[in-house]
Amino acid sequence: MSPSRYAVFGHPIQHSLSPHIHKAFSEQTGISLEYTAIDTMPETFSATLDAFVAQGGRGGNVTLPLKEAAFALCARTSERARLAGAVNTLVRESDAWYGDNTDGAGLVRDLTGRHGLDLRGRRALLLGAGGAARGIAPALLDAGVMELVIVNRTPERADELMDRLGDPARAHSRYWDDLESHGDFELILNATSIGRDAKAEFDLPLGLCNRMTLAVDLNYGNAAIPFLAWARAAECRDVVDGLGMLVEQAAESFELWHQVRPDTDPVYQKLREHDALLVMAN
Ligand code: NAP
């Protein structure tokens, strides 16, 4: 019998680490599967998924810029996907897709479990309002942050995310240009793709940080360098990149597909060594 097929969909996708992570989970658990990376844009996503199903596709991960399109394609979604309006995990159910969003659970598990950080009571600043920000915002509120301030280059998207969260006592949208007037934060998260531009710099006010601040970049590798450099210059107490979140959200997806939870630590350690080599090489 041929192994069941899974894939990560996005654009660009050739450097995705997801195939390596799921291969490692497959070897560790003894669950036979094939997991590939498929490049597709929002306009071609639906047809690409149909072809994937015709070839035995059973589930998928979705990354930028497709998470909102994936949500729209699903017949059924989880509550956390509906809160986010974005799907990062697809599960084939008879003749339709079920969509979930494991980004938020993955982030919180990495920060609280792996790094031993307590998110409760923190005043949080979320930079970005794209698919990833939408996935993590509900989980941050669930994890007990005291306040969530959302800023985005396109302010209407920050407003939309705030409305979607439906927690006006804790979640607010503000203007990026006006950041200096919002005080300091114990948690600052970069959920933008700014760092993917090799020439990018983070020109944020240093006063956003205090002596308790945890700075988190959802990006990893070279894309995390600009924000993490700013966070270190601002003397944030803890600085974490998105590699652990990547492994944890993948484990959540793996569990949805196979009802088995893989051990993430050895996979994370291996990727961390690989990531250090890649960053040093640049
Ligand atoms: P997305 O839906 O395309 O959203 C991109 C976000 O970045 C939007 O808020 C966008 O603002 C903002 N942005 C892009 N270029 C900008 C610029 N030059 N200046 C200011 N803001 C800019 O992407 P996504 O899915 O949310 O992913 C965001 C990043 O998180 C990606 O780099 C991705 O690799 C990373 N990520 C990591 C994980 C993980 O597991 N570690 C999971 C998910 C995502 P506008 O709305 O104004 O366009």
Image (tube, rainbow, N blue to C red):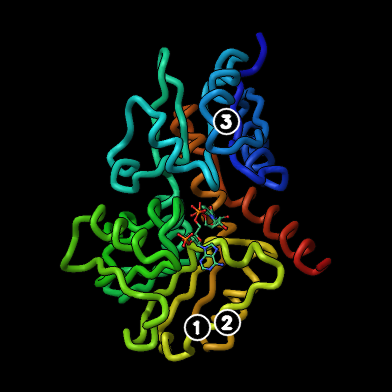
Determine whether, in the image, residue 269 is placed left or right of residue 234: right
**Residue 95 vertical placement versus 277 (above, below):** above
| Residue found at x 34% / y 25% | 75
Residue identified by numbered label 1: 204
Residue 151 point in image, percent of width and height? 38, 70
Query: Which residue is most to the top?
Result: 1
Please count the marks in the image.
3
Q: Residues within 10 Å of mark 3 (few under 14, many from 20)?
A: few
Residue identified by numbered label 3: 44
Q: CA distance from mark 3 to mark 2?
A: 37 Å
**Residue 154 vertical placement versus 43 (above, below):** below
Residue identified by numbered label 2: 230
The image quadrant of residue 278 is bottom right
Q: Amino acid at mark 3?
A: Thr
| Residue found at x 54% / y 31% | 45
- Pair 1/3: label in front: 3
The image quadrant where one finds the N terminus is: top right
The image quadrant of residue 148 is bottom left
Q: Amino acid at mark 1?
A: Leu
Q: Amino acid at mark 2?
A: Trp
Q: CA distance from mark 1 to mark 3?
A: 37 Å
Mark 3 or 2, nearer chain start: 3
Taking depth in this image into account, of 45 and 170 the one nearest to the observer is 45
The image quadrant where one finds the C terminus is: bottom right
The answer to whether mark 3 is within 8 Å of ligand 1 is no
| Residue found at x 44% / y 51% | 131
Q: CA distance from mark 1 to mark 2?
A: 8 Å
Residue 108 point in image, percent of width and height? 41, 58
